[in-house]
Amino acid sequence: MKKFIFLLLFPALFNFSCTTTKQGTLIDQYKYQVQKKIICQNGAVVSAHPLASKVGIEILKMGGNAVDAAIATQLALAVVYPNAGNLGGGGFMVARLKDGKLVAIDYREKAPGKAHRDMYLTATGEPQFELSQHGHLSAGVPGTVAGLFESALYAKLSFKKLIQPAIDLAEKGFVISEREARAFNGLKDDFEKYSTQTPAFVKTIPWKGGDTLFQKDLAATLKRIMKKGAKGFYEGETARLIVEEMKRGNGIISLEDLKNYKAASREPHVFDYKGYKIIGMPMPSSGGLLVNQMMKMIEDKPIATYGFHSPEAVQLMVEAERRAFADRAEFMGDADFYKVPVAKLTSEKYLKERMADFVPGKASTSEQVKPGDIPAMESEETTHLSVIDKDGNAVAVTTTLNNSYGSKTVVGGAGFILNDEMDDFSIKPGTPNMYGAIGGEANAIMPGKRMLSSMTPTIVLKNDLPYLVVGTPGGTTIPTSVFQTLINIIEFNMNTEDAVWKPKFHHQWLPDEVYLEKGFSESTRASLTNMGYKIVDRNGIGRTEVIRVLPDKTFEAVADNRGDDHAEGW
Ligand code: GLY
């Protein structure tokens, strides 16, 4: 046990060699270590947990493609990374397939049929965050399982093969880290308060690193999905268990909501930046559009000559972030329900006008920078995985329960945590959600509508071939972290580790503050203060996972060093 803890505390930061495990080799869920970087020829997976990344690589070794690996990695994360990996949440997949086809799959949760605009307000109109952020009523209709089956249209292996590793991890257990033990101990009261039956994450004596977590109920749910497909989740026993849990905890998800849930295939959000093609998620994620706006707002400035984290570069990027987030608050929401003016928001003329009042060396204010003139902080705990295979399939997936461990409601008898994604709606126009994001009509609650997201799974093509696969968790900091990672690589010519690991910053229009991550340059901080910015210190911003295709066609996979994130390859 001691050896295991040692391995997790001292991650192999600079292991550049490919794994030597043979095809089909069983993954040792009782002894594993964190690896931050790998360079490989055949395929790579980067995710928030070593075991999940290893599952993805095993699937590639079995003959699966990057989509197979992404599906199996998500299923494994639902077991080994319950703070954000999930069956009870939702997410987005962006892919560029080997034949050049671009794919965007939306499996964002939906508001239940009984949801309504003012469901979280008191009789006097006060928002009740306790209801939108915790427990049964905070859950949207889960989308993940439908999304996995929609993704499987592009996979090669049987779903049975993709789900088996997750079943094994749930049934035979896996060893948890110190970090996970601390989380389970810290959340014991919440799990007891918001679940109606004692979940696997709760035990009487405290958890410690090296303990094994068994999840029998979750294994049974996974087996039902293996046998019956999406119906094993949205109908029959699992659906019955969800609805019974709802009844016990005053939630509103019904059998009909579950049966009617469908994932959606969408047109990816695509734009060019200096010859690179950037492929992102469209609505209901704001991610692709925000990255598009921010990058285009700075494209005509010589940012490379300013230098990485120079006051000039940071100020320029902060002002682009401010303006994009002002537009998010006003114009962005589920495009199936609200006409989002995407073409206007991304037009060259509009973005030029947005930056017309930018003054180098002087902070704008968010009072002055209103949403653009055109007609018409949520949880940090989300998770991202990046996958690539030797045939040229590249996949970026970001999924979430919203904040860490979602609603903290575990479905009795089914063993998975439900999301608290309803808080990503604007529960009262103009009122910040749990992480300070503001919204209005575009993101108001309606039955069957999807709540606006910030998730930003992104693929960058160079010469029309995959170059970068990128994404991160981090609530509203997701699009700004992806923006900075791309600028770090494309403009500042940084190596991949630095692009991911160097401190990040964030501005989201309101509150009118610049968040600086621990370790940020002191002199740049002082310059920003002199320019008139209010600076707020932040711990880790995001956990960005990047795969970069090197000039010799090998894959460089880098996991963020802000968590136990792990890069695996072969
Ligand atoms: N709940 C995080 C997001 O979707 O942005």
Image (cartoon, rainbow, N blue to C red):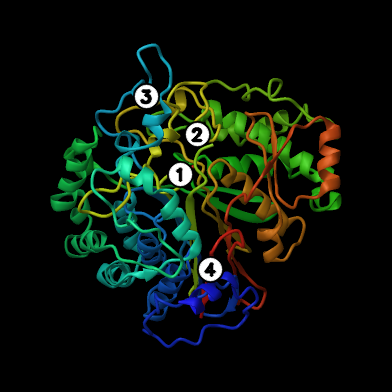
Q: Is residue 118 left or right of residue 570?
A: left
Disc on the earlier residue, 2 or 3: 3
How crowded pointer 3 is (Cα within 10 Å; few <14, some 14-19, many 20+) is rated as many
Q: Is residue 251 visible?
A: yes
Q: Is mark 4 within 8 Å of ligand 1?
A: no
Disc on the earlier residue, 1 or 4: 1
Q: Residue at x 32, y 34 (%)?
A: 111
Instruction: Identify the disc placed on residue 566.
Output: 4
**Where residue 45 sits: x, y (%)?**
49, 69
C-alpha gap between disc 4 and disc 2? 28 Å
The residue that label 1 is drawn on is: 403
The residue that label 3 is drawn on is: 120
Q: Residue at x 18, y 36 (%)?
A: 247
**Pick the front one: 180 or 568:** 180
**Pick the front one: 548 or 95:** 548
Labels 1 and 2 touching (C-beta < 8 A) = yes
Labels 2 and 3 touching (C-beta < 8 A) = no
Q: The disc labelled 1 sits on which kind of residue?
A: Asn
Disc on the earlier residue, 4 or 3: 3
C-alpha gap between disc 1 and disc 2? 9 Å
**Where residue 86 sits: x, y (%)?**
36, 54
Disc on the earlier residue, 1 or 3: 3
Q: The disc labelled 2 sits on which kind of residue?
A: Met
Q: The disc labelled 4 sits on which kind of residue?
A: His
Element at label 1: loop
How crowded pointer 4 is (Cα within 10 Å; few <14, some 14-19, many 20+) is rated as many
The residue that label 2 is drawn on is: 434
**Where residue 365 sits: x, y (%)?**
73, 25
Q: Residue furthest left?
A: 236
How crowded pointer 1 is (Cα within 10 Å; few <14, some 14-19, many 20+) is rated as many
Q: Is residue 88 left or right of residue 50?
A: left
